[in-house]
Amino acid sequence: MTFSNTGLAGRPEPSQAPHRGGEASTAEQGARWITVGALFVGALNYGYALVLTRLLDVRAFSVFAAGQRLSLCVTSVAVVAIPWMLAQALARARSDADQVRAVRFAALLGALTGVAAAGVVAGIAREFADTPTTSVLAAGTLLMFVTTTTLGWLQGRERLRTLACLNVTQAAVKLAAGVLLVAVLGLSDTGALAALGICVVPFLFWWPYRTSTRPVGRGAAHAHRNLGRTATGIAAVQALVALVATVDVVLATVLPMPPSDAASYQASVMVGRVPLFLAGAISTAFFPALSRRGASATLTASAVRMYLTLAVAASAVCATIPPAVLGILFPSAYGRMSVLLAFAAVSGCAVGALNLAATLFQAIDDFRCLRAQLLGFGVYLAALLVGWRVGGVVGYAAGTALGTVVAAALLVGRLVRRQGTEILTRPVLTESLLVIGVLVVLRPLPVAWLAAALIIAARTAVRFLRDRGGHGRRPPAPSGQPPDPPSPSARAPSAAQPPGDRTPTGPPRDDGPPKCRDPSRILREAVWAGTPLPTDDDTLRHALALARRNQVEGRLARAYPHALADTAAQAEQATRLFRRNLAESTDRLRAAGIPMVLIKADLTGDYTYNNFDLVVPPGQWQAGRHALAPWTARSTSYWLERSTKVLLWPAHGPAVHLHTAVCWFGIPVVPTGHLLDRATPADDLGCLLPDEADALRIWLAHALFQNLTLNLAELLALRPLLKPDVIDEAQREAAAEGWGSGCRSALAVATAAIARLDRGDQVRLPVPLPVPLSFRVAAEHAYHLARGGHWLTAAREVALRVPLVLTKKLRGGPT
């Protein structure tokens, strides 16, 4: 089990979605995270736009706005087509191989389409920008495409809190980089657009690097063809949404319009399109659940309700902003915004509805909606051009609003015909008219309007964050239809999967003994207590996902041998490969006269991880690498540990993780000499095993210094080591090594979790260690190192602790 920085780069895990009854609740919770993040992103983006109106002249700002909208138009297809294809594949996947195929295909598709998109952007941008500006815009576009794999990985695994935090980080980096390039370096619109590419760099740190390099087995070509068809359909639907959302802004730059009118219209669109971002946030959260369930009226109604709750209030506020407030926020050159904002707010709300409806069709692979979209786009384009001819910039804005309303109505109407009017529960017409009326009446009084807008915003936020209106209720199905049947796409096996564990779909049966539908309890009872409970296939599938996260999928599969026969066979095969590779590697090391200790390996169960850990004397580490060179197909190392650890991969099976010491990020914890002196031989394995007190400390240290959690497999390994004499000796040794207090605290967490599991109580798995404990043990151990004269190592430990905690909590925390 690797001690290196794995996180997302480790073994792929199946989507850990909730069981069916809680999917709406989980999607709504994720939507809240993404939406709150989107609000911060919107505030930062609007702040960036406002700053640029002060730093750039009208012409430069117009170029920036056009370039940004052009980039968004092109990448808006990519940030949906590629990530959502990947998210859908991960949500429907039933094996690790399915996920690896999907990640690899998404990475390849992102790179290839990124190159093509960069060329298209460069060709169009030449019409309104100079060569340097065109170049940075094209480079930024390519980088955005490359990072779409990260978006799909996080969305498919429903780690929406991490995704929300990354989105906020992206906006903050864009603001800081743009202000630096424009205000300090004087790069004008070129610097402002360069920030669009710089800001996506944080996504590269969460890119699933190792997942994309793992073997995929058979069926990759067939899987890639199916994934390609899905991506093409999603891209086509999203392309038309993107065209409706961006064509008006780009045409405002191309048409013979006064620069002040064009800038006023573009700024109005930036303000009025808030509902579009809200719809995107809600769509991102609901898409994985909809991909699993299919045409679910329950999920659709929840998504529609959440959108209407936010979009109506946001549009009403944007449409009625008093001229006095606009004069404070924008320079005098943007004076026509007071007239244009009303139309921009209407079009923004309509485009948001269009985007949400398109998502619902994409999730169930219903691409026949393209006909309604094409008709809507034709009406939209005709309306804005006619409006421009008749009324100039005001007619242009009115035509855009009319066209977007028609386009949205066509697509929403098709959705209602497919799923019934029940998805439009809790109408907001009366309340919406009241809100708009109040704001219109108060518009001549800026102070009163501002107070009313704040009250409306606060009430809307409370409703959005606390409303549980859809939980526990199922909208009645349309007449003559069964409620919420899975769609064929959700019912069929994943396009990327070979034959494997088949999960029957359809409603759970009520006959037979009572069935447990709590995946966590299923896992605890089957693996820890050894008493598998009756359950349904859907719950068992989610329990298997949780088991994989806790590295006990083999134990769960043996508890349910008929339902999880393929998983049991895979675990047995992985264990055989581990024992074979362990024997082959230790034979070579013994032949070279190099002693080795196998650490962090519970030999009483399965071994399904992708590497195992051997510690050798520091002076013989390079010799060990040379001894294993003929056996090694490739080697990898983490840059912070390149002088103390290396992963040596054979042609098949798990790799050898060769260590010079029990250490993390180059920070030693357990002395190697002491470990080797106390180790005992394991004749059947050909290597040494740690003394019980050393084994206990290594398990606890791995949790404290690396993972910040204890999974169920680790708790199973710890349970037989919790003997009074072993605990006393381990605590004495830990105190001598400079982390005695941390050892006692981690041991207390582990023993409390084991006691709760023994009683059959609810336990959060993996068991998290408290964040203060992580910081406290780092300070304790760093002080010990400094007292021993190891100042640089102590400084490294202190410097790495905060990034480690943040990374682990973002990557491994609940979403």
Image: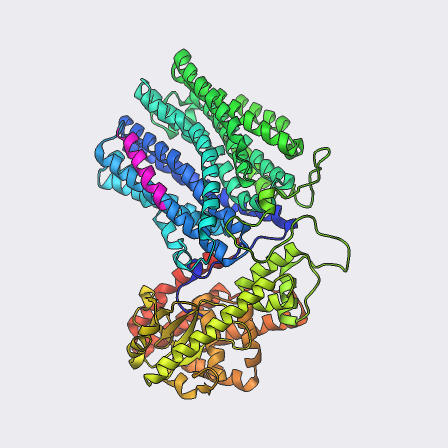
Give the colour scheme of this rendering. Answer: rainbow
Compared across the picture, whether 313 is left or right of 171 comes to right
Tell me if 440 is positioned left or right of 430 in this view: left
State how many labels appear.
Answer: 0
- Region in magenta: 111-126
Q: Position of residue 69 (x, y in %)?
A: 37, 32
Residue 113 visible somewhere in the drawing: yes
The answer to whether residue 186 is above or below residue 153 is above
Which residue is depicted at the point 45% across and 37% down? 235
Q: Which residue occupies the foreground of this view, 109 or 293?
A: 109
Examine the structure image and report whether residue 120 is included in the region drawn in magenta. yes
Instruction: Decide whether residue 667 is among the magenta residues.
Output: no
Quadrant in which the N terminus appears: bottom left
The answer, for residue 40, to whether it is visible in the render is no
Instruction: Give the camera-side residue of 659 and 469.
Output: 659
Task: Using the image as rendered, state which of residue 372 and residue 669 is in the foreground.
Answer: 372
The residue at the point 57 percent across, 43 percent down is: 489
Say above or below: 58 vs 759: above
- Image coordinates of residue 555 in percent, x first then y, are 59, 69
Q: Is residue 43 left or right of residue 63?
A: right
Residue 797, position as x, y percentages in the image: 36, 68
Residue 600 sits above or below residue 268 on the image = below
> Who's the residue at 38% across and 35% down the image?
74
Residue 313 in which image quadrant? top right
Q: What main secondary structure does the magenta stretch of the protein show?
A: helix
Extreme top residue here?
390
Q: Position of residue 790 (x, y in %)?
A: 30, 75
